[in-house]
Image: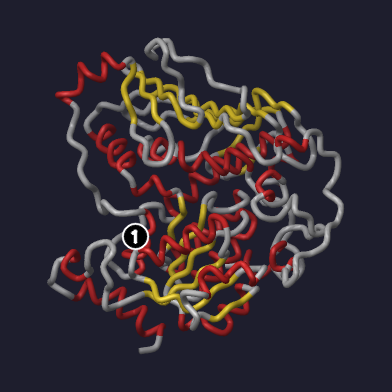
Amino acid sequence: MKSINRRSFLKTSAAASTIPAFNILPSYGADPKEKLNLAIIGCSNQGGGIGGGAIGTGMANVVALCDVEPSRTQRFKAKHPEAKVYDDFRKMFDEMGDKIDACTAGVPDHSHFPIAMRAMAEGVAVYVEKPLAHTFEECELLIAAEKKYKGICQMGNQGHSGGQRMQFKTWVEEGIIKNVRKVDACMNKGRRWHPWGNVKSFPPAEPMPKGMNWDVWAGTAPKHNYSSKFDKGNWRGWYDYGNGAFGDWGPHTLDSIHRFLELGLPYEIRADKLEGQNDFIYPMATTIAFEFAERGKDMPAMSINWYDGVKNQPPHPKELDKGRKVPACGKVMYSDDLTFMGGTHSSGLRIIPEAKMKEMGPDLPKIPRGDTNQSHMRNFMLAAMGEEECNSKFAVSGPLTQVFALGCIAQRLGGTFKFDTKTKQITNNKRANQLLKGHPPRKGWEEYYKM
C-alpha cells in the first residue's frame, strides 16, 4: 500500500470504526500490525534520543535517516539497513515525501522551522524538539501552517504528556490554583558557553568533519565558517542559531502555567539583570520579567520572572520549610491564598509549606489519567495514526515559544519593551521589533517563509 494512501487510511480508520481506540492499537511495547513509515532527521545527541523514542513505541518502520553528517546515522542504519540515508532533508522529501508518514526533527533551534514547514506541506506528521522555532515570526508561520494543512504536530517538551500537566489542569479547574500573581522560575545550571567568557567575534574556521553538509546545517540562518563551537550542541548559545537557556528549559518549566492560566502574550518584557552581555552569545546570567494582563475571573494580571546563571537564583520563598531549597531548575508560584513549588518536565507541584500540603491533602482532587498515560512520543505516534490529539500541538506550543522568543530579545538587547498583543509588534524599540523576524532567510531558503 502506498504511503500517501496508507496515511489516509491510518487517519480515517479509527473514526470510521465503532471499536474503542484502545482495542485498535496494542499496549505500549507491543508490535502493531500497522506501522508508520518514519524518517529521523538529526540522528545524534537529542535527535538520536527522540528518534529512538519513536522506534521504541513499536509503531515505527524506519524508512529514512537524515543528518548533515551522514556518519551520525550509523547507530540507526545498523538496525534498519533498508532505510535510505540523506544529508539534506529537502532531497529526502523530494524523493520520499509520499513514502513517509511521520518524522522527528532533533536538530539545532534555527533548523526546526524549515523542516517543520516542509513536513506539513508534504502531509507528514512532525515531532519537533523544543523550542519550537528560533524567532517569533517563525512560530507565527508554524501555527498558521498547522491550521492550513491540518497538520499533526508535536513540540518535544516531554513533560507535557506527563502527570504534571493533568495535575495543573485539574487544580485550575477545581479552584486550587487561582488568583496567581507571580511566578519565579529558574535554570541555575552551567551552560556550554559560560566558559568562553567575553566573546568578541565568531570563532575562527576549523577543519570540516568529513562528509559534513555545512550549507544545510546553516539552513535559513547566516552561514559562518565551520567551528566545533557551533556544532554538536554548542550552537545553543549563539544568537544566530540558538535560544539560550530560556529557550532550552522554559518549555519544560512554564508549559502548563502558560497553557492553563491562559497567559497568551505579555504586554511588557524587561531585562532586569544581564551579566556578560555581548553581541554574539547569550549572557552568563540573566533575569528577565514578563507582565501579563488580566484574563477574566480568577486570572488577574501576573508576572513571570526568569532567572538563569549558576549563581543568579530567585528569591527564597518565606513559605519554604527550613532546610529546603528551590530546585536549580524549577519554579515557585504565588497566588492570593497558596504558594506552590515544582520542578521541570513531569515533576508535579507541591503546596508549601509542607504542613499546608498535608493539611489540604485529603481534600485535593484526584488527578485523572488524561488523554494518554504513555510517553510524549507515543502520544505523537498515536496522533499520527488518528487515535489521539497531540498534547503539545503548534497551536499550544507556538504561543508558548513566542514568549521565549520575546525573552531572548530582552536578553540580547537589554531594556524594557512594550508589546502590542493585538498587532504583535514591539512598539518602543525598532531593533527589538525587527528581531521578531530576525535575519532575512539566506538565499535559496526564502520559500519556507511563504505560505
Q: Amino acid at mark 1?
A: Arg
Q: Residue at x 60, y 30 (%)?
A: 308
Q: What residue do we see at 35% from left, 31% from top?
A: 296
Q: Quadrant of residue 302?
A: top left
Vertical order, 258 against 126 (above or below): above
Q: Is residue 105 above or below residue 254?
A: below
Residue farthest along the front direction in this orientation: 78
Please say if 3 is above or below 328: below
Q: Quadrant of the C terminus?
A: bottom right
Seen from this angle, which residue lies furthest left?
18
Q: Residue 102: x percent and y percent?
A: 44, 71
Q: Position of residue 50 (x, y in %)?
A: 47, 59
- Per the image, the residue denoted by label 1 is 378
Q: In the rendered view of the protein, which quadrant contains the N terminus?
A: bottom left
- Relative placement, left or right, of 394 versus 134 is left
Q: Residue at x 50, y 60 (%)?
A: 144
Question: How does the figure colour the protein chain or chains?
Answer: secondary structure
* Horizontal relation, residue 369 to residue 10: left or right: left
> Which picture quadrant has residue 263?
top left
Query: Circle 1 sits in a helix, a strand or a loop, which is it?
Result: helix
Residue at 57% across, 85% down = 95
How many numbered callouts? 1
Residue 2 shown left or right of residue 90 in the figure: left
Indicate the quadrant where residue 368 lies: top left
Residue 163 drawn at (x, y percent)? 30, 42
Please state which of residues 162 and 139 is positioned toward the viewer in this rendering.
Answer: 162
Return the residue found at the far bottom: 1
Estimate how packed mark 1 is, as few (under 14), some (14 to 19) or many (20 or more) residues with alpha carbons within 10 Å: many
Foreground of the two, 188 or 219: 188
Q: Which of 181 and 240 lies nearest the eye of the viewer? A: 240
Q: Position of residue 324 (x, y in %)?
A: 42, 17
